[in-house]
Image (cartoon, helix red, strand yellow):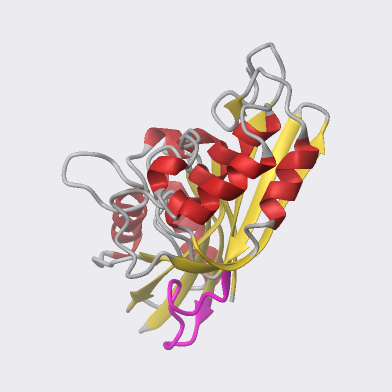
Amino acid sequence: MTRWKLTLEYEGGGFCGWQRQAHDLSVQQVLEEAIQKFSGETVTLQAAGRTDAGVHARGQAAHFDLEKDAEADTVEGAINFHVRPHRVVVVRAEAVSNDFNARFSAKSRTYRYHIINRRAPPVLLADQAWHVPKPLDVNPMREAARSLIGKHDFSTFRAHNCQSNSPVKTLDFLGIAQEEELVTITARARSFLYHQVRNMAGTLVMVGTGQWSLADFTAAFAAADRTKGGPTAPAHGLCFWEVEY
């Protein structure tokens, strides 16, 4: 029996999310069926994080156990052959120790939220970035973002159906970069609340467009109330960037 770790990349638009669903196609289902086709074994993949419908991944990680003996290149190539034509790929397959767990062994998870900031709608990045036509001033966005770093009650950015036991999380990094019309929000933490990154992005955009002042943002965060926060940014702008172990 070998435990395998997969590093995965996928385009989330064609899936109902990572987790298996009864009536919709998930990333987990496509991968588990591909593994069954090449190995003859029924496996259960456990991922570092469960992405929502429409959310992409560049460095998602997952693990599974396989009785069949195989080389890493064979595992990677066979899965990639059988997942076609779905837009998911194994970037790397590697044998790991039996105590490795894609979810619980993770030290941090990094997400990136991409925004196209221009009047004209995007074409090339239409499915991978949120189109914000109003001009964004990233300086007040960065100042607002700095106030979120550290250990806080993030209820203002927590979805109403979040199943986490506590709204208190520690945000290790929250940075905003701008390269011409592309604005990227990068968030890193050990774990996140449900929709936390998308809710933070939506609220930071309100600051960037001038709809909210920094005082408005600070008051909303301090309220620890989701109804006081800004909108939830669209799923297609979010990408699960990497996991650190």
Specify the quadrant that holds the C terminus. bottom right
65 vs 190, left or right, is left
Question: On the rendered structure, is 83 left or right of 56?
Answer: left
The percent position of residue 142, horizontal first and vertical second, equals 75, 47
**Observer-nearest of 159 and 105:** 159
In the rendered image, residue 119 lying in the magenta stretch gets the answer: no
Q: Position of residue 202 (x, y in %)?
A: 54, 37
> What is the x, y in percent for residue 23?
17, 40
Q: Is residue 101 magenta?
A: yes
Q: Is residue 166 above or below residue 196?
A: below
Seen at 45% across and 57% down, the residue is 78
Identify the magenta region. Answer: 95-108
- Which residue is pictured at 45% across the width and 51% down the height? 156
Quadrant of the rendering where the N terminus is positioned: bottom left
Please indicate, yes or no, whether residue 9 appears anywhere in the rendered image: no
Q: Nearer the viewer, residue 242 or 218?
A: 218
50 vs 40, nearest the viewer: 50
Q: Is residue 107 above or below residue 80?
A: below
The x, y position of residue 22, in whole percent, is: 16, 46
Task: Identify the residue at image location x=26%, y=52%.
Answer: 20
In the figure, 243 relative to 238: above or below?
Answer: below
Magenta stretch, main secondary structure, is loop
Relative to residue 84, is residue 149 depicted above or below?
below
Question: Does the image show residue 39?
Answer: yes
Q: Residue furthest left?
A: 22
Which residue is painted at 73% across and 28% down in the image?
A: 136
Left or right of 16 on screen, residue 142: right
Between 152 and 32, which is closer to the camera in this rendering?
A: 152
The residue lying furthest to the right in this view is: 180
Say how many tags the image has: 0
